[in-house]
Image (cartoon, helix red, strand yellow):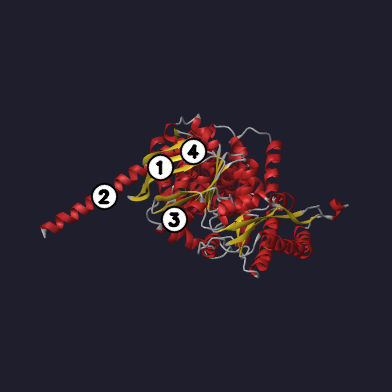
């Protein structure tokens, strides 16, 4: 019996050890991958690719950000109104909405939306290019695959995330105004006065810092998963692309929330 | 002795502990077509990827004109080496979100400082040469498999490389398309002067354009040399693999495969009786000129039609033929002397002149929708042969005796 317990303990620690080593290995590889991609942003002939990616990640994601931003603000307005009315503090609903959107919900939800829309597509596209030997073809044509495929996406994410976050913030506050002012009768002047006066520059800066951190995380993870999809041991071929895409989205969302906590604790 | 362009010395590669290349020693010479053949999973693509620099050996060394690739400086010789190399992937590796033009232009846009106009000119030239002008703005998914191959070929050629690596360029193609792609490779190799390294299973078609073949067997080089040498080399691997691949017939023309032709020749003169003789005729069509004026597809169609005519006519008088090169056919007529052979050729020439060539002309005009003037010349060289002559000698004698036997000139030129 003691022998079995000893053996199981050994297997458990072996598993934990292997898992930890794997995580550290991937983390190291992802950091190197990001560094290589980031450095190559500033090389020649990158503008056109970056503009294309900004269009793809940024412009085409704007519609979903509009919808999500607007409805998040509206729901928030509804919830906060019925909570604050119990304490007779309806007047601060504008402040509550603007602060929660600009500090937290704006950057986080925008990042999650872009991950779902553009991040997954990034992984799938690069993954397919990997398994169909297009990345090898780039190498044989003397085109640096990291420079050509990864750097524009990292740059575009860093450009697009803060812009879309700002977009989300404005629409969120507007959504809150629709429910609280137009539908529930809160005074318009009070709503905007509170929303403006409660906000400090540091709150807006914090939101943008978060969005840049999320941009780095999402673009690195999504590109990394696609680029190394052929090295997966759990699946092969097209299956590996689908597994990589799922992993990229899940991992990005989890890391967005973890890093959100970490950045917030630094900023507070 | 000529210095090899690329040389593998004891190259070994393993994946997850499994040995794929096992002390491979082989040489590739400049300005030749070298074909690598071997069973699936024997390491052919891995070998090609080593040449392209996509993989590096775990043991051994690869040399470029005597200099180890591993010792080349990244920004100097290594970069120059990579600049001179192109790779045509088995699955084409075309970018599906780019049009044909953008795919072909990609290496020039990304790696050169050429102006837009110059890039356009170069790309359009390659697109025209590979007969893709009509699909320039289309996406790869809108093209047939053969067209996609041609786009990949155009992209491989656009940088004017000195070495082009072709990973199974004819896989999945029908016999006509197979021959078209191979004739394109041979044609551009001749025209542009590059070194071609091919992986192909399409024996015998690929042999018509190959100068050397390398047979990989279980990760090792079992044979390297000219195709003719494989016939003399009685090696069980060659019997088992190469000859089984070749089959009995050349699918395109219906003529005998080279192996069968050689066996039939040996059987016909096998008794080795003094005085046993026959005649050999080497037919040639102006293949390269036809490619220039009509394109690869039409040129291959003409070879196919001529092959069928020769097969039908010579078969009736106990003759047997094989394709020697893409547009070259050799026929052996046992028990017929030179004078009789001349009469046979004269009769065939008359038939070609009156029936085959005009019908080929009209079919070609309809198919290519071109009103351009093009000529077809069929030449033949006759030589007497006896049991002691080897094929090479017969070919050489027949080649020196070649003259035009049938021709069809377009009306404009006749006037």
From this view, report whether residue B49 is shown above or below residue B78: below
Dot 1: what SS? helix
User: Do tag 2 and tag 3 residues touch (Cβ < 8 Å)?
Assistant: no
From this view, report whether residue A43 is shown above or below residue A174: above
Circle 2 or circle 4, nearest the eye: 4
**Mark number displayed over residue A240:** 3
Q: Which residue is mark 1?
A: A259
Dot 2: what SS? helix
Residue occupying the far right of the picture: B415
Q: Which residue is mark 2?
A: A16
**Residue B326 % position (x, y):** 63, 54
Q: Within 10 Å of the Cα at label 2, are there few (<14), some (14-19), or many (20+) other Cα atoms? A: few
Circle 4 or circle 1, nearest the eye: 4
Q: Residue at x 78, y 58 (%)?
A: B369
Between B231 and B52, the one lying in front of the other is: B231
From this view, report whether residue B20 is shown above or below residue B263: above
Q: Which residue is mark 4?
A: B4
Q: Which of marks 2 and 1 precedes in the sequence?
A: 2
């Amino acid at each position: 019996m003691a022998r079995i317990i000893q053996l199981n303990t050994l297997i458990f620690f072996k598993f934990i050890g292997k898992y930890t080593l794997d995580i550290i290995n991937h983390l190291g590889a992802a950091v190197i991958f990001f560094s290589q991609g980031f450095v190559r942003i500033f090389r020649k002939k990158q503008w056109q690719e970056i503009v294309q990616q900004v269009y793809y990640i940024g412009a085409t994601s704007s519609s979903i950000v509009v919808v999500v931003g607007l409805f998040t603000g509206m729901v928030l307005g509804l919830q906060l109104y019925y909570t604050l009315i119990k304490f007779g503090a309806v007047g601060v609903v504008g402040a509550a909405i603007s602060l929660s959107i600009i500090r937290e919900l704006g950057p986080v939800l925008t990042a999650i939306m872009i991950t779902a829309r553009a991040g997954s597509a990034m992984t799938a596209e690069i993954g397919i290019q990997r398994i169909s030997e297009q990345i090898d073809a780039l190498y044989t044509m003397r085109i640096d695959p990291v420079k050509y495929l990864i750097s524009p996406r990292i740059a575009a994410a860093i450009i697009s995330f803060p812009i879309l976050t700002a977009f989300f913030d404005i629409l969120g506050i507007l959504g809150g105004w629709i429910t609280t002012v137009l539908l529930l009768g809160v005074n318009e002047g009070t709503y905007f006065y509170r929303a403006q006066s409660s906000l400090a520059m540091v709150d807006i800066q914090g939101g943008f810092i978060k969005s840049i951190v999320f941009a780095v995380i999402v673009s690195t993870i999504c590109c990394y998963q696609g680029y190394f999809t052929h090295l997966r041991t759990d699946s092969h071929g097209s299956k590996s692309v689908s597994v990589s895409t799922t992993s990229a989205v899940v991992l990005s969302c989890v890391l967005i929330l973890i890093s959100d906590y970490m950045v917030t604790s630094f900023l507070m | 002795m000529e210095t090899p362009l690329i040389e593998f010395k004891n190259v070994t590669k393993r994946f997850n502990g499994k040995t794929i290349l096992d002390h491979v020693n082989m040489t590739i010479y400049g300005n030749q077509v070298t074909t690598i053949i071997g069973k699936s999973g024997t390491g052919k693509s891995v070998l090609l990827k080593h040449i392209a620099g996509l993989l590096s050996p775990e043991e051994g060394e690869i040399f470029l004109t005597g200099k180890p690739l591993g010792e080349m400086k990244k920004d100097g010789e290594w970069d120059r080496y990579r600049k001179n190399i192109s790779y045509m992937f088995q699955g084409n590796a075309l970018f599906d979100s780019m049009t044909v033009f953008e795919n072909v232009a990609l290496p020039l846009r990304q790696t050169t400082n050429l102006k837009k106009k110059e890039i356009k000119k170069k790309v359009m030239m390659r697109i025209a040469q590979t007969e893709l002008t009509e699909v320039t703005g289309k996406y790869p998914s809108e093209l047939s498999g053969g067209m996609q191959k041609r786009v990949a070929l155009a992209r491989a050629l656009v940088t004017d490389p000195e070495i082009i690596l072709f990973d199974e360029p004819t896989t999945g193609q029908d016999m006509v398309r197979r021959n078209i792609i191979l004739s394109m490779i041979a044609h551009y190799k001749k025209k542009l002067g590059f070194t071609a390294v091919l992986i192909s299973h399409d024996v015998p078609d690929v042999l018509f354009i190959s100068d050397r073949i390398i047979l990989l067997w279980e990760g090792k080089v079992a044979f390297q040399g000219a195709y003719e040498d494989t016939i003399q080399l009685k090696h069980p691997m060659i019997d088992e693999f190469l000859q089984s691949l070749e089959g009995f017939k050349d699918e395109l023309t219906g003529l005998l495969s080279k192996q069968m032709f050689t066996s039939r020749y040996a059987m016909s003169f096998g008794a080795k009786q003094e005085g046993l003789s026959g005649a050999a005729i080497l037919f040639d069509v102006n293949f390269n000129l036809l490619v220039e004026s009509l394109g690869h597809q039409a040129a291959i169609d003409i070879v196919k039609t001529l092959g069928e005519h020769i097969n039908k006519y010579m078969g009736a008088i106990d003759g047997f033929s094989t394709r020697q090169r893409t547009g070259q056919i050799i026929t052996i007529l046992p028990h017929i002397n030179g004078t009789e052979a001349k009469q046979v050729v004269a009769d065939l020439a008359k038939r070609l002149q009156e029936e085959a060539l005009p019908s080929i002309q009209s079919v070609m005009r309809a198919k290519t929708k071109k009103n351009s003037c093009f000529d077809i010349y069929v030449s033949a060289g006759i030589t007497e042969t006896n049991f002691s002559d080897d094929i090479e000698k017969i070919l050489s004698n027949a080649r020196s005796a070649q003259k035009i036997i049938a021709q069809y000139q377009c009306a404009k030129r006749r006037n």
